[in-house]
Structure formats: structure tokens, C-alpha cells
Amino acid sequence: MESRVVWKDGMAFEAHLDGFTFTIDAGESVGGRNLGPKPKGLTLTSLAGCTAMDVISILAKMRVPLDSFQVSADADLADSHPKKFEKIVIRYFFTGQDIPSDRVERAVQLSEERYCGVSATLSPSVELASEIFINGEKVG
């Protein structure tokens, strides 16, 4: 795996990853023009995407049907530089008929503890917590 960024101007970079090209930038307060996502935000998206793919794959193998599924990741940042992630809360939202909460909880646990490489990369230095919601109700 390789990622490459090429400086364009200001704080904007053209990012290249797996055959995709996109712009990353910084906010206006630090010289950027908001032309694309910020690197730390992409880390959150990577975490949410990694665990979401694991969970949906595990639940498919368990034959758990879903109407919809989404994952959000919200981070607390350090107040001083380096403004690193201190804590990330991952929220899993499932909707559907008769979703077995025990299977959902197991799928999330397997992703977070065994399969998600992004989670494993972050977890030694970042506190990770999760919350699971089925049809709007918090479980676990």
C-alpha cells in the first residue's frame, strides 16, 4: 500500500491512493481554502469505513439482514500541539426487523478487537469507545 501527496498551492495537496486522486486541504484559519477533507478527518473516515466493512461482512456471514447501516466516529483532540486524537467514540447504527443484538454486538467486538487494522493502529495511543444503536435504541 502506498499513498502519495503532491503540493498544489497554499495548503492544498493532490492525494493519490489505490488509483484514486482527490484533494486534501486545511481550513482557512491555517492558510488553506477548504478544497478537500483534512488529514485528521480522513483518519476518522478510515476508522469508520474499516470497522463498517468488517461488521457488514461478519453480519452477512451470520445471515443477519439489515435495512440500513451506518457508522460515525467522533474525536476529541488534544488542546495543544500536536493536536492528536485523545479519544474516539465509534457509533454503529443498525435498522431492520428483528435484528439480534447479541450478533450485532459480537460482530462489532470482532471488528474492534480482531479485524480492523485502522482500529488496531490507533488503539495503542488513542482511547477507543463504541456505542451500538438498533432501530434508534442504544444496546449493550
Image (cartoon, rainbow, N blue to C red):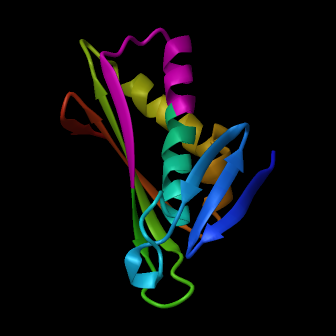
Quarter placement of the C terminus: top left
Query: Which residue occupies 35% across, 27% down?
Result: 69
Position of 133 with respect to 85 (left or right) is: left
Please provide percent x and percent y for residue 33: 43, 70
Please provide percent x and percent y for residue 34: 42, 65
- The span shown in magenta is 53-73
The answer to whether 102 is drawn above or below residue 52 in the figure is above
Please provide percent x and percent y for residue 54: 57, 31
Position of 11 with respect to 87 (left or right) is: right
54 in the magenta segment: yes
Quarter placement of the N terminus: top right
Query: Which residue occupies 47% across, 8% down?
Result: 63
Q: Find the residue positioned furthest to the left.
A: 136
Q: Inspect this view and state whether residue 36 appears.
A: yes
Please provide percent x and percent y for residue 35: 45, 60
Q: Nearer the viewer, residue 8 or 26?
A: 8
61 in the magenta segment: yes
